[in-house]
Structures are given as structure tokens and as C-alpha cells.
Image: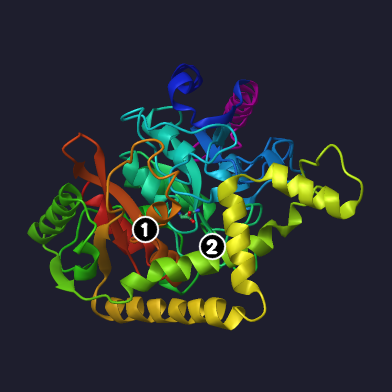
Amino acid sequence: AYLDRAEAAEKNINAFITLDREGALAGAKEVDRKIAAGELKSPIAGVPVAIKANMCIEGKLTSCASHILDNFYPTYTSTAVEKLLEAGAVNLGSTNMDEFAMGSTSETSYFGPTHNPWDLDRVPGGSSGGSAAAVAANECAVALGSDTGGSIRQPASFCGITGIKPTYGRVSRYGLIAYGSSLDQIGPLGKDVTDCATILEIISGKDLKDSTSVGVNAGEDTADERMKTDFTSALKADVKGMKIGVPKDYFLEGIDEDVKKAVLAAADRLKELGAEVEEFDLGMVEYAIPAYYIIACAEASSNLERFDGVKYGYRTKDYNDLHEMYKKTRSEGFGPEVKRRIMLGSFVLSSGYYDAYYVKALRVKALIKKAFDKAFEKYDVILGPVAPTTALKCGESLSDPIKMYLGDVYTVAINLAGIPGISLPCGYDKNGLPIGLQLLGQTFEEKKIIRAAYTFE
Ligand code: GLN
């Protein structure tokens, strides 16, 4: 049923780069066999999922929505996807995204833009716009996305669904094609908090193949409550006594009035239900975007060096020597936004500028983490908007990248601090477009934000 629905919807939405009917049906058959044989007991056995096109799956096109990887069929599967498949999920295909996850609109894909199911003239957000649109349009039940500076939370908000960006290290990045390695996290996008918590529980845990991953795997024991990955145990509608901080700095200039109203109404609702809600000054907010774009681009310029026409993917047709081959392959293989970021990143890492830009940005990153630490001494959860606006019109930000970067004001600091965040729907604007609410927690305190979010379910 999901495949039929997806095939019909794709003409308008373009959420998938590859929709794999044959592979999905074979996967479903195998799940059936395992269930019949008593080999599989799982809450997601047979559930149709979709995977963002930047997570490697053995033998399946993993393109990162780029020309340079449009013939790349990995020889191994990323840990998060492997865990989902082992739990009996059925993969319907790879979802569209901004090229190499660089963007907020899913318009920079080599495979054409994704459209927002709520209004086809609008973007679904990005970079996990394909995953969000696929869930919102009932083309799959849940999807995986990745979030470097908002790429799970912002498309979830634009498409009226729920998404979780876990604590850095909670989910293994093994097999995730890197954008900004110190910021990247894989997480779930789903119809509600219950679906997202269920998926997060399955994909998180320590993985020996990713040295930055932490914690234990589901079912393993630990004395440290924060390391436990039993996120579904937090699905309780009880916020009595919970301390919730609302940063005043998140509601100043640039925020759409409807967004502001809906988010503050959600804060009031939590108060009615017994939470202690208080406004406070978070600080550092205006430095988040410049610090993020310096660090993310620096890491991207280094991570994307490997795409040179030798080891992976596309290679230019005509060349006289090695250098010309590199140059033509990369010029033809990458799109304009990716090139812009590689240039920016190479610049801030170059000798003479490294201290002035890159090292300074790292200092700002540390101060941002400090500001959050201070807030979490007082509050269990921080509440704010996901984005200053609802879904933008298609094409609006393509011509003005700075404007697009500014739209990330409420999401990027979370990645710089490494803390978890959840995005969930909290109302509609005057055009009937969904508005997103963001709840943030201290590192490894996903359960608190899941609990607070569940009160809205
Ligand atoms: N919009 C941000 C960027 O363009 C975040 C992207 C992401 O989280 N992958 O970098």
C-alpha cells in the first residue's frame, strides 16, 4: 500500500531519488519468513521506512543527491540502517536531499527539488526534505535523516511532522557520508513522538566502528541512567514540576508573528499542565550562524577532498593529466552550493586565516556550549521555535544564500553544543502551513524532551 501511494505521489513530490519496489517487496517477504519462523520479534517488523541518500547501503545507490556520486553503490551498510533492517524495517528507497546535506530547502539536489506535500509551490525544508516529505505524504511510515545544523528538525517543522536530532554520539555515524563530522547526527523523522522514540531506541548505542559513539545498546545494562537508550519509557504525558526555560533571544527580530504566537501558546499549554515555565536570556544567539558556517564549511572542505574521480563515483571524460582530471571531475561533479562551501572552508583553514576564522569559531562554539550548560543548570528543557518562518516558496532562497543561512538561527547552535533537540508540530500559520516547536535538552537527556513532547500527542 505504501509503495502504491509513493508511486502515485512521486509525480508531484519527488521525495525519493530511488524508489525500490523490488527490493522492498523482497525485504518484506524476508521479514514475513522470519516472523513465521519465530526469528524476529520487533515493534517495527514490516514497517516501511525510507533512508536519506547520504547513508550507505550495500549494493544500493547512495548518491548524496550529487552528480559526483550518482554511480556509487557502497560495499557496506551504515550502522543505523543495519540496525533498522535487523529489527525488521522494510526499506522503500533513498530520499532526496540538498546535495551533500548542504542547504535548508532540498532544492540543490542533482535529481531535482522535492516539493512540500502541504503546498507544492513551497519547499519541504532541508537538507532531509525528501525524508520529511515522504513521511508527511504517507509515502513511508518513518524515515531516517541527518542533522548537521537543523536538517532533521527544520524539514520536520516545514512538513508538519516530528523529528529528533539526538545528542552527538548517540547514534553511530559509521556509513553516513560526512558533511561536518563534529556536528553530524543521524535521527528519525516520523508522524509523532512515539514513532520517533521507537526508531531512536533501535538505532542508538555504542558502535566500535565509530569512535565518537557512546552509550550502550538496547537491552544492555548500565548504572548511568543517561546512557540508557530505552527512550520509549519516556512516553508519559507528565510534565508536572518540569522546569522549562524559554529564551527571550529566540523571539526578537526576524521571527514571523504566527510562529511566535504558536510557540508561546505551546509554552502556556505546558504551564497549564503543571510545568514551571520561565523566560530567560540564553545569550550568544547572534554568533551561532557565523561560527556554524565557518566550522561546517571547514570540515566539509576536508571531508569532500575524497571525491576526486579516483576512488569514488563520477570521473570526467576527457583529460590530459592527473591534475586536469581532478579539476574537471570536481568542477563538473559538484553543484554551486557545494563549491561555495568548499571554497569558504578552504579559505578559513588556509594559513594566515586559520587563527582569525577557524580557531575563533571554535572558541565561540565552546562559549555556546557554556551558555547552554548554564541554562541547563536551571532548566530541564529549553523551548523555542525551530525556524523563524514556515515553509518558503520554491526558488526564494536559491538566489540569496545568506538569507537561507539566516533561517538556521534556531537550529545550528544545538549542533555546536552537541545537545539533543526535537521538532514537533504546534499549530498553523495564516496560510494553513504547519509551525514547528523545538524542545532542547542537556546532552544525553533525550528522555526529558521526549517526555515533554509527548504531552502534545
Ligand atoms: N541548513 C544547514 C546547512 O546548510 C544545515 C544542514 C544540515 O543540517 N545538514 O548547513
Residue at x-position 58% and y-position 63%: 344
Mark 1 residue element: helix
Residue 403 image offset from top left, x and y in percent: 38, 53
Residue located beneath label 1 in the image: 406
Viewer-proximal residue among 221 and 258: 258
Residue range highlighted in magenta? 22-44
Q: Residues within 10 Å of mark 2 (few under 14, many from 20)?
A: few
Look at the picture and state if 297 lies above or below 280.
above
Amino acid type indicated by mark 2: Glu
Residue located beneath label 2 in the image: 220
- Could one spot residue 221 in this view of the protein? no
Residue at x-position 74% and y-position 52%: 307
Look at the picture and state if 323 lies above or below 93.
below
Q: Residues within 10 Å of mark 1 (few under 14, many from 20)?
A: some
Residue at x-position 50% and y-position 40%: 42
In the picture, measured across the screen, residue 125 lies left or right of residue 426, that is: right
Residue found at the very far right of the displayed protein: 320
* Image quadrant where residue 210 sits: bottom right
